[in-house]
Amino acid sequence: MSAAKAAATHIDWTKLSTSLGLKTETVAALTAFRKRNEEARRILTDLKEQKTTVDFAHYRKVLKNQAVVDELEKAFGSFKPTSYDVKAQIKSIEAVEAKALERAKSTATKVESELADLQATLKNIETSRPIEELTVDDVLKSRPEIAEKVDALLAKGKWDTKGYNDKFGYVTLF
């Protein structure tokens, strides 16, 4: 349990919410959890710092009615805090924890997959030929859908590419 407490105190919440590419609802849930956790820690620290002993001798000196002080001392001495069965709350916390862990694993898997794809893309970019050396045949081989689209347009008798003249200007050769 102490390892979990130590890990919880060393979490970089800013890095956690920004660098992992988490969904907004997950970030909001983490932020809400962090606020509740910090508030609970603050309250616990405040309560631990409070004085917990009662000086009945002082009250006997100050108050004239000694019976009240005796009755309060007797009640204080016989007081036993009520214990609650928190198994249901612990189960719900464990369920939320399991769901969060599952989401974290899923996010980690997605991030690793995206990272692998990006590494492959980067390697492909670094090893590819310069665009000046590419031929039309190379482009058509790598993207056969372009050839299919061109063939379909030619079959329909369309010789112009939509938006070409708008982007590059109308050029005619005489």
Image: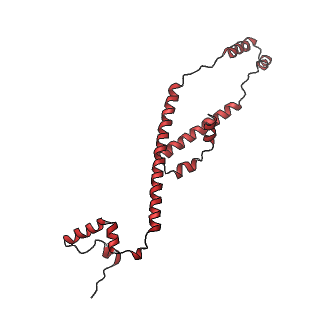
Quadrant of the image occupied by residue 149? bottom left
The residue furthest left is: 156
Q: Position of residue 109 (x, y in %)?
A: 46, 48
Which residue is depicted at the point 46% across and 42% down?
A: 103
The residue furthest bottom is: 174
Which residue is depicted at the point 48% across and 59% down?
A: 119
Q: Does residue 23 appear anywhere in the picture?
A: no
In the foreground, 101 or 169: 101
In the foreground, 116 or 15: 116
Q: Position of residue 105 (x, y in %)?
A: 48, 44
Q: In this rendering, would 33 be left or right of 137?
A: right
Above or below 49: residue 127: below
In the foreground, 105 or 158: 105
Quadrant of the image occupied by residue 50? top right
The residue furthest top is: 67
Q: Does residue 87 appear anywhere in the picture?
A: yes
Which residue is depicted at the point 45% across and 50% down?
A: 110
Quadrant of the image occupied by residue 37? top right
Which residue is depicted at the point 61% across and 39% down?
A: 38
Render colour scheme:
secondary structure
Instruction: Report the label total.
Output: 0
The C terminus: image quadrant? bottom left
Q: Position of residue 98 (x, y in %)?
A: 49, 36
The N terminus: image quadrant? top right
Q: Position of residue 165 (x, y in %)?
A: 31, 76
